[in-house]
Amino acid sequence: MFIGEYHYSIDDKNRLGVPVKFRTELLKGAVVTRGLDTCLFLFPRKEWTKLATKLSEMPISKSKSRTIARLMLAGAMDVSVDKQGRINLPDYLRKYAGIGKKAVVAGLYNRMEIWDEKKWETFKKDAEEDSSEIADTLGEIGV
């Protein structure tokens, strides 16, 4: 399970550190792709395979299905963790997410999200301001 918030710098070769406690799971293979809300999703291979299968089964006759499949599948890239615990972020994905030199890796149970540090702080601030709505949503699902 991936949880927590971790701050990293991206080096001149587009390499981003991965939290130590997450690395073992990623050694079996990993995929980074366009995420939602202008972040990147980083999946261990096993979780990526589950999602990719579901995306491939969506009806191609529906515009929104095609769009999300294109966004996530065509944007995906296999990545591996190097000896220093870093992955390489392709330029097109960094550009998509607007990631500068400072990034945040957020653990979200079965995946990680990679955010530009400033965008992450803005997202958190906005979410904290909407805490009443979030609480209502949690109540709807029995939490």
Image (cartoon, grey):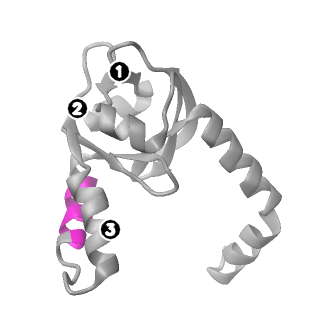
The magenta stretch is: 47-55
Query: On the image, numbered disc 1 is attached to which residue?
Result: 15
- Mark 1 vs mark 3, foreground winner is 3
Q: Of helix, strand and loop, which one carries label 1?
A: strand
Quarter of the rendering occupied by the C terminus: bottom right
Residues packed near mark 2 inside 10 Å, few (<14), some (14 to 19) or many (20 plus): some
Quarter holding residue 42: top left
Residue 106 in magenta stretch: no
Q: Judge by depth and name the residue closer to the eye, 87 or 61.
A: 61
Q: Earlier in the sequence, mark 1 or mark 2?
A: 1
Q: Amino acid at mark 1?
A: Arg
Q: Amino acid at mark 3?
A: Ile
Q: Amino acid at mark 2?
A: Leu
Q: Earlier in the sequence, mark 3 or mark 2?
A: 2
Dominant SS of magenta comes to helix
- State how far apart marks 1 and 2 are (Cα): 16 Å
The image shows residue 32 at horizontal and vertical percentages of 30, 43
The image shows residue 23 at horizontal and vertical percentages of 33, 30
- State how far apart marks 1 and 3 are (Cα): 26 Å
What residue is drawn where x is 18% and y is 68%?
A: 53
Query: On the image, numbered disc 3 is attached to which residue?
Result: 68
What residue is drawn where x is 78% and y is 54%?
A: 128
Query: On the image, numbered disc 2 is attached to which residue?
Result: 27
**Does residue 13 appear in the picture of this structure?**
yes
